Image (cartoon, rainbow, N blue to C red):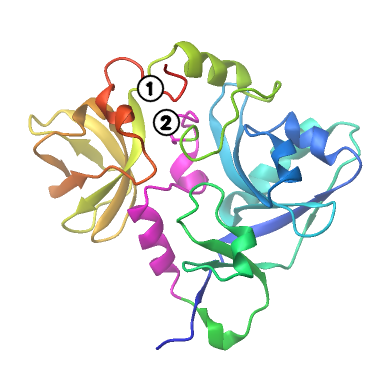
Amino acid sequence: MSSQRLIKLPHRVILKLHGADTNAFLQGLITNDVTKLQSQNGLAAFLLNTKGRIVEDVLLWRRGTDDVFLECSKANQSVLVKEILKYRLRKRVEISETTDQVFFEQTSTDKSSEYRDPRFSNFGARVFGNPSSSEVSENREAYENLRRSNGIAEGAVELADLLPFQANGDLLNMVSLDKGCYIGQELTARTAHTGVIRRRILPFECEGQVKIGADILDEKKNKVGKIISSDSTRCLGILQLASFKSPKLSADDVALTARQPEWMPDKILANNKTRTSLTDS
């Protein structure tokens, strides 16, 4: 039996935020309620632009200090930091890079369970630091495959410019609907309470490799979505929910089958022509 229980995630980085105004600053910046970190170690959220569209998804972690550790995609780190600094003004908040490495553990142990993924508890846990090399696998694609299977999009490459609910932020514990104001909050709140969410990210089974950005077509060759991540057997795409049960979906001439993630309530797909938010009665 392999002892490589951890998968190294070199595409993820950790920033440290510290200072007297850190919590208040983050509370006015991201989509989730930072006060939840008083009772839990992890928090998932989006940073939005003023138009209410996603700049980056972040995971916030408490690790035994008053500092907040922010996990984000390495590829979009500079954009994210620039965006944070733009709103910092005179607030007492310092941002610094860390040398912490990020690892994923699919079957969490007692030690790692304190850093369970806050988006979906069955999606393993994060481990930080420098574990023994004998415990670590470099097979990042195994992580990506599992993430696609669970319907979880990650990073600006997949999420940038989408609306939070299109990225399932209301279903993956990434958006608070009862906190105060934050950047992009007005459109998010209006969508939650009065809008119709017609498109969402969903996982697909695919019968071959599909190009990122390829259009998803229905049986009549109508464009009903777009691929945002893919390997040879699994894809993530943003799909018109009315096409979920289409008998013949394809992209790049590759057959696709849309799947309902374990965390997605039935009503999200059943009521796609009217209301599809968790704020529904």
Asked if 38 appears above or below 219 in the picture, the reply is: below
SS type, badge 2: loop
1 and 2 marks in contact (CB < 8 Å): yes
Residue at the spot x=49%, y=14% of the render? 193
Residue 89 quadrant: top right
Residue 180 included in the magenta stretch of the image: no
Q: How crowded is mark 1: few (under 14 residues within 10 Å), some or many (20 or more)?
A: many
- Residue 166 has which mark? 2
Q: In this view, does 78 lie to the left or right of 245?
A: right
- Give how far across and how far down residue 139 sits, in percent: 43, 74
Regarding residue 252, the answer to whether it shows in the image is no
Q: How crowded is mark 2: few (under 14 residues within 10 Å), some or many (20 or more)?
A: some
Quadrant for the N terminus, please: bottom left
Q: Where is residue 279 in the image (x, y as percent from the top left)?
A: 47, 20
Where on the picture, by quarter, is residue 49?
top right
* Span of residues in magenta: 139-168
Identified at 60% across, 39% down, the residue is 45
Q: Residue at x 27, y 56 (%)?
A: 234
| Mark 1 or mark 2, earlier in chain | 2
Number of the label disc, if any, that sits on residue 197: 1
Give me the C-alpha separation between circle 1 and circle 2.
Answer: 7 Å
Identify residue type, mark 2: Gln
Q: What residue type is labelled 1?
A: Ile
Tell me: residue 30, above or below residue 123.
above
Residue 260 percent coordinates (x, y): 28, 42
Q: Can residue 162 be found in the magenta stretch?
A: yes
Query: Which residue is at the front of the view, 81 or 186?
Result: 186
The label on residue 29 is none
Residue for point 20% across, 53% down = 206
Residue 187 visible (yes or no) = yes
